Image (tube, rainbow, N blue to C red):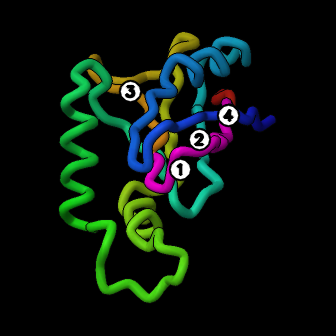
Amino acid sequence: MWHRLAVVSDKRNQLVDITARVQEVVTRSGIVTGLCQLFAPHTTAGLLINEACDPHVARDILTTLERLVPNRGDYRHAEGNSDAHLKSVLTGSHLTVPVEEGRLSLGAWQGLFLADFDGPRQRQVMVAVTALS
């Protein structure tokens, strides 16, 4: 069963920490050992795992992506958000995280983020938890 999380960004480029909300889905599932799958059904947003403790890491990621794929470029896409499409390709739209003892099996500093590259807006993240035998 898929759970849909509404995630709101308030900037054009923003990493929104969704770790606690995804853990709530895992906890409610009652699954002790399994996989947690996440999917962002958007072409201008992505998902990533990275450090969740130091906010400078998110800033560094966004700044580097902006340098690699600037807002203004030699783009043909007419909507003015070509950079957002390209950044979402770089981050990807899905993640799989192991679940052990009913918890997301993330590293000590890791968190789950929705990366919005065409905000501010409301996005969705689809989350499913599957048991492993």
Q: Earlier in the sequence, mark 4 or mark 1?
A: 4
Q: Amino acid at mark 1?
A: His
Q: Earlier in the sequence, mark 3 or mark 4?
A: 4
Q: Earlier in the sequence, mark 1 or mark 3?
A: 1
Residue position for label 4: 6
Magenta residue span: 116-129
Mark 4 neighbour density, 10 Å: few (under 14) some (14–19) many (20 or more)? few
Mark 3 neighbour density, 10 Å: few (under 14) some (14–19) many (20 or more)? some
Residue for point 68% across, 18% down? 31
| Tags 4 and 2 touching, CB below 8 Å | no
Task: Please check the rendered image and state whether residue 128 is part of the magenta-colored stretch, yes or no.
Answer: yes
Q: Is residue 37 left or right of residue 55?
A: right
Q: Is residue 59 above or below residue 41?
A: above
Residue position for label 1: 94
| Tags 4 and 1 touching, CB below 8 Å | no
Name the image quarter holding residue 90: bottom left
Marks 4/1: CA–CA distance: 16 Å
Q: Earlier in the sequence, mark 2 or mark 3?
A: 2
